[in-house]
Every structure is written in C-alpha cells, then in structure tokens.
Amino acid sequence: MGNIINFAHRGSSKICPENTMAAFRKALEQGATGIETDVQLTKDGQLVLIHDETLERITSGTGWVKDHTLKELKNLDAGGKFDSAFQDERIPLLDELLELVKDTETIVNIELKNGVILYEGLEQKVIDRVRAFNMSERVVISSFNHYSLVLCKKLAPEIRTGILYMEGLYEPWEYAKTIKADALHAYHYAVLPEFVQGAKTSGMVYHPFTVNDVKEMQRLLQAGVNGIITDYPDRLAALLAAK
Ligand code: G3P
Ligand code: CA
C-alpha cells in the first residue's frame, strides 16, 4: 500500500476550516501525502484557494470571489465561521500552499473551479506558478471542465491532468485517453473493481472523491485505486499504516 496517495480534501477540512493554511498544515501532520484544493481568480488576476464562487458560506465577506481584489479578500476572516479559534485564517494564494509543500514529497491536486465562472487565463496562470516552484512532477490538475484540461495539456504536457466526473461514463479511461488525461477523479460510488482494472490496462490511475467512511476506503483500496481524496486524512493514514 506504500504508493497510495492520501489526498486531504481542501486540507484536513473536518477539523480545520477548509482551504486554509491551518487545514493544509494539519493534513501534513496527520499523514496526508497529497493535498486537494480549489483555485479561482480574483478581480486583479491572483490565484486564490477557495471552493465556492461566492464568499458567504466560508468567509466574513459577501458576493463573488471574482468581484474582489486580493487585498479585499485578504481582509476577510476565512476561519471564524468554522470556529472562532480560526478567525485569523485568511484565503490563501496558491503560492502559499506551494511554498508550504515545495520541500516535501507532497502531491498537490489543484482543481480549477471554472464551471460556474469561466475564468479567462486560469489554466496558464496555474501552470506558470507550478513551473515557478519546479513542481510539475508533483501536481495533478483536475476539473469538471474537461475543455480546460485539454487546454492545460496543450500548454503544459508535462503536468498531469485528472478528469472529475460524477457517474455514468462508459469506460471513462478510454474517454480520458482521448483528451490526454492521466487520472480519473471519480465520485467514489462510480468506482467498481472492474473499472479500476480497465483503467490500469490503459495506464490510467484512479483517485476517487470524497471518501470519508473507513469501510468505503477499504473497498476502494481492495479494488486497487491509486489514491483517495478524503476529508479525513488521519483515517486513511491509519488504514494504510495497518496494511
Ligand atoms: O476533487 C474532488 C472534489 O473536490 C470535487 O468536488 O465540489 O468538493 O470540489 P468539490
Ligand atoms: Ca475540489
């Protein structure tokens, strides 16, 4: 089980506010070997890590992420709604996460949040930062927007891409090959052992999301997946250590 990637979904997002530096640091402490995060663009073109396109659920702000400058976003509390102990947490830049992990072996799964909002230039900006940190070999770019993944592959063939999907794709590994993707980031219930074996014959890897139940983690490991995206990296780390 040594090479299974333990991806912390938005960091360790059940005990820290999601997509904050506290959540990323905690995930590493808990044995995560990968970090999953969501990236969007600010009004002034900066890459920030936040899942929702709007600010209300997570932060002290209101409105769209895209309508605020980095300076405005950095003034918001991104942790207090989770727990007042985290009220000093801020929305991080992608650079802050890359800086945290650059001297480790951590894999970073950067999800491009370009479904509701089509962020012009998002792909190139992400690629530029990944290259600037010399981390092309340790990044997987994923998205539900597969046009975006095609563009990423054209711009940066050396960076792996993973298709995000919910269910119902017939032989998704064959489809993924047609867009030169490297990984299948599937909703976990859509992952059956025969699919994992099919993917392996195509050299494709499975990283199902978001798996929080230990029995479901065990089922997927038994099926032969290559990584699991979880809100509980501690649970997965314990499971992998026991194998
Ligand atoms: O990358 C897996 C998962 O994060 C995709 O869904 O909505 O949690 O970003 P979501
Ligand atoms: Ca995500």
Image (cartoon, rainbow, N blue to C red):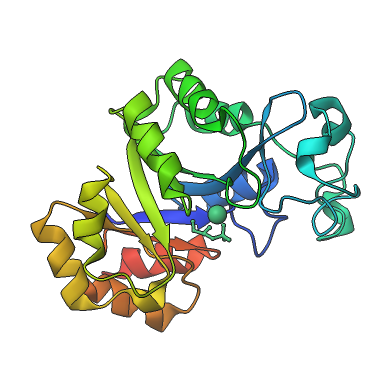
Q: Nearer the viewer, residue 160 or 101?
A: 160
239 versus 148 height, above or below: below
Q: Nearer the viewer, residue 86 or 175?
A: 175
21 versus 170 height, above or below: above
Residue 55 in picture, x, y percent from top left: 82, 50
Q: Residue furthest left?
A: 201
Q: Nearer the viewer, residue 42 or 34?
A: 42
Residue 68 in picture, x, y percent from top left: 84, 34
Q: Quadrant of the N terminus?
A: bottom left
Q: Nearer the viewer, residue 99 or 113?
A: 113
Residue 214 can be seen in this image: yes
Residue 129 in picture, x, y percent from top left: 51, 22
80 versus 172 height, above or below: above
Quarter of the rendered structure image containing ligand 2:
bottom right
Residue 33 can be seen in this image: no
- Residue depicted at x 26% and y 63%: 172
Q: Quadrant of residue 39?
A: top right
Q: Quadrant of residue 197?
A: bottom left
162 versus 240 height, above or below: above
